Amino acid sequence: MDRRDFIRTSLTAGAGIAAAGLTGCGTDTAADKKAPRPYLLKTGSLAPRMKLSWEPYELQLQHTFTVATHSRKTTPDVQVRLEYDGFTAHGEASMPPYLGHTVESVCAFLQKVDLGQFTDPFQIEDILAYVDSLSEGDAPAKAAVDIALHDLVGQLLGQPLFRIWGLDAAKAPSTTFTIGIDTPEVVREKTLECAGKFNILKVKVGLDNDTEMIETIRSVTDLPLAVDANQGWKDRQKALDEIFWLAEKGVVMVEQPMPKEQLDDIAWITERSPVPIFADESIQRLRDIPAIKGAFSGINIKLMKCTGLLEARKMLTYARAEGMRVMLGCMTETSCACTAAAHLSPAVDFADLDGNLLISNDRFEGMTIRDGRMVLPDRPGLGLIEK
């Protein structure tokens, strides 16, 4: 056999081996059979199309939820499904009324989205850039598409999102559990309900009963506390005095102490505060970070405000580069959106991902809580199980 014939024979044999490996016709080891097989993307005329569908879904809160600006017993929501070549992925848009979005506005936006024009779900940047270009706002609707697309890609790869991103699920932090503003009797009852289940509590403040709220909680638990004023404090000196008192009571961080318009006052507080001050209402998307840099110790990233996981990861990276701390928050949500955020949680300092625990009609099983810490599902994509 001359050199030319040898090369031709070798290439032919190699191609046969490669084809056997791609089509699954080779002999599998036991380990191969257990390992998830990545999806083989079809191209050309065989390429399937993504199909988006959605339905309104009202979230029922277990207790009336009160913050400094409003109270509610339900939260409007839209559940999204993304189908592709036999796979079904899930997304969610949750709409607390104070953000100005409605079921009608979300559905109207989703009606504009044509994912059928894309044949490669892995082109996440291009697909979500297109989705973002369809309107200036509509962040919850965009987040629903983003979450479903990430779920789909994780399923196609056969891996959970945290592993695709190179994160260690064991580093998922404890999540806070939120105690809304209420009477001492109800606050005491809510606090006792979560005794032994959580390692840190979050307390809504910002009205004239802040002291009563904290003292009531302290009468039944000594757990560390985070507080969220939801822009409720208006005088910076009074706010700073209260923060020093809160620190003495075991508070470890404060969210949005004053209205977002009072940025200079917030910066003044942050410079003097004994605990870190996090931005919530003052920030929504990546483009908002430069304007608040230096005024806060850190940022609270919420998928429903920032348009989803792709932008959330960019915000996290930018904030870290600026020396800021990062927390992940949520709205009242099912385990779909909460679990999506939880996959990113091993990379942050604080997590407030209890929205699924505040409702009585969750549609999924996903992220769970064990000894106060989040446990991420080790299943492909979001790892959701429909109930």
Image (tube, rainbow, N blue to C red):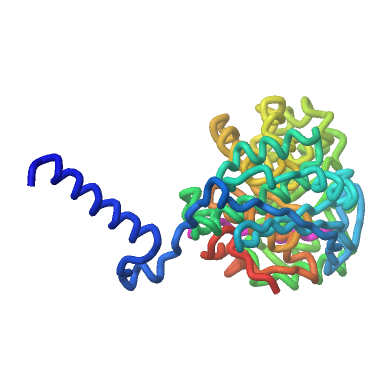
Kindly indicate the quadrant of the structure image that contains residue 235.
Answer: top right
Kindly indicate the quadrant of the structure image that contains residue 364.
Answer: bottom right
Question: Which of these two is toward me, 213 or 196?
Answer: 196
Question: Which of these two is toward me, 297 or 140?
Answer: 140
Q: Looking at the image, which residue is at 85% across and 40% down?
A: 233
Q: Is residue 18 above or below residue 265?
A: below
Q: Is residue 222 magenta?
A: no
Please indicate, yes or no, whether residue 300 appears anywhere in the rendered image: yes
Q: Looking at the image, which residue is at 66% across and 52% down?
A: 50
Q: Residue furthest left?
A: 1
Left or right: 274 as drawn, with respect to 1: right
Question: Which of these two is toward me, 55 or 311?
Answer: 55
Left or right: 320 as drawn, with respect to 189: left
Could you say where residue 301 lies in the image, as x and y percent from the top left? 68, 43
Q: Looking at the image, which residue is at 71% across and 70% down?
A: 194
Could you say where residue 331 lies in the image, as x and y percent from the top left? 77, 53
Kindly indicate the quadrant of the structure image that contains residue 51.
Answer: bottom right
The magenta stretch spans which residues? 170-180
Could you say where residue 15 lies in the image, as x and y percent from the top left? 29, 51
Please indicate, yes or no, whether residue 274 appears anywhere in the rendered image: no
Question: Which of these two is toward me, 72 or 39?
Answer: 39
Location of the C terminus (image quadrant): bottom right
Q: Looking at the image, which residue is at 82% across and 60% down?
A: 55
Q: Is residue 314 above or below residue 193?
A: above
Q: Is residue 369 above or below residue 114?
A: below
Left or right: 2 as drawn, with respect to 125: left
Could you say where residue 109 lies in the image, as x and y percent from the top left? 82, 44
Q: How many discs appear?
A: 0
Q: Is residue 177 magenta?
A: yes
